[in-house]
Amino acid sequence: MRAFELSEEQRALREVAARVAADVHAPRAEEWDRDRTPFPLDERGRLGDLGYLGISLPEVYGGGGAPVVDALVVIEELAKVCRPAAFQVFESNTGPAQVVAHLGTDEQKARFLPSVIKGEASMAVAISEPDAGSAATDMRTHAVLEGDRYRVNGAKRWVSNAGHAELYLLYVRLSDAPGAKGIGALIVEKETPGVSFGAGEKLMGFRGIPSCDIFYEDAMVPAANLLVPAGGFRSLFSAFSMERLGNATVSLAIGQAALDRTIDYVRTRTQFGKPLIEFQGVQLALADMIVQMESARLLVYRAAADAGTGLPDSLQVSIAKRAANEAGKVVTDMAIQLHGGNGYTEEYGIERLHRDAHGWAIAGGTPTMQRIRIVSEKLGLKFDQRA
């Protein structure tokens, strides 16, 4: 079986995205991280003008209609330099907007997708709650239909881009049925009365991508914004595999950036009269880093290539996410070690990569949860973690 290869058009797309990252985002990425600056709206508009926010969304709404691989190519190049920029492309092409594209009505797609594709709006996903993280089906936020609107009450936590996104894909309990059977999803607009936002989280990494709690107090959401009815939790999480594939791509980019910087460093840094690359211990460590990244890359792009313009296989995605998340953490840690004291400074940017590697591994389902999913899906078994 041949390894996955990019087409000539995809390689050109990669080259342009790399130039955009280097020319536009690299000069400000460190500043945005240091000051915890939310990604500027004008920069989001620039990504829309470039066509990056709709690469794999339907052409009829202004998107490119391309396979998800094309979006991942752009996400990877941007994420090597600036994760907040990559996040915008990630959310639109592999995040909640993609869920709307696959599961929404024609009216919902026409109403919400064009503004996302243009960069006029962004959509965040609200799943976790104070007492429902990995155990998502323990969520308590609920919605009751009253006439032509749903009355929503509850709270969500760990919502990336909360308070800055204009639209939210809200996982919510729509009936009294236990567990997943009562869960569906609504599209909630930021300015909906009864929706409020908590103080911004001060995270170790993920800076430039705001995160905070969202509170719903008798928020009235139009019934027309029902994306998935009660009992549709399985379809929601099937679509969520796309988000995990985008997540894995960011982890891949972080690890690759650390590897590339380390190769340059050990070639030019001298100790005891010779370049670091001449020491066998450095060669062994570098080999391990290369194997980690090549393995993760093949798994990520296998899942993407097999998905085409549809949803990816959830088992393939869990395998890819677990591999890429761990590779990002391990490779950035090894990069710090091979940079010595310089790796522990902010000047070389390795510590920022390492901080972000841990954040992206947690987001979208931790590597530990992916391990459980891998066994469950491979063996066709269900495990009750509450027993």
Image: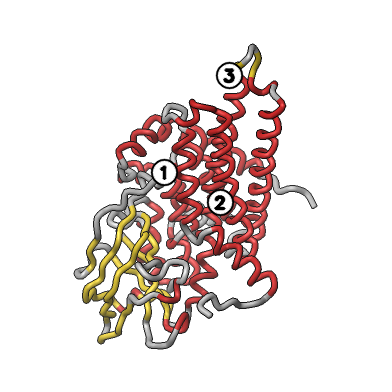
Position of residue 116 in the picture relative to residue 192 (left or right)? right
Q: Name the kind of residue labelled 1 in the image.
A: Ala
**Residue matched to label 3:** 269
Residue sticking out furthest to the top: 273
Q: Secondary structure at mark 3?
A: loop
**Residue matched to label 1:** 85
**Residue matched to label 2:** 325
Marks 1 and 2 sit apart, C-alpha to C-alpha, by: 19 Å
Q: Name the kind of residue labelled 2 in the image.
A: Asn
Residue located at (62% from left, 39% from top): 11
Q: Are marks 3 and 1 in contact (CB under 8 Å)?
A: no
Q: Name the kind of residue labelled 3 in the image.
A: Arg
Mark 2 surroundings: few (<14), some (14-19) or many (≥20) residues within 10 A:
many
Image spot of residue 183 (x, y percent) = 42, 79
Mark 1 surroundings: few (<14), some (14-19) or many (≥20) residues within 10 A:
many
Residue located at (41% from left, 45% from top): 205
Marks 3 and 1 sit apart, C-alpha to C-alpha, by: 31 Å
Q: Classify residue 50 by image quadrant.
A: top left
Q: Classify residue 163 by image quadrant.
A: bottom left
Q: Secondary structure at mark 2?
A: helix
First in residue order: circle 3 vs circle 1: 1
As displayed, is residue 142 above or below residue 366? below
Image spot of residue 123 (x, y percent) = 37, 59
Image spot of residue 261 (x, y percent) = 56, 30
Of the two numbered discs 3 and 1 in the rendering, the one whose residue sits closer to the viewer: 3
Marks 3 and 2 sit apart, C-alpha to C-alpha, by: 29 Å
Residue located at (50% from left, 32% from top): 19
Q: Which mark is residue 21?
A: none
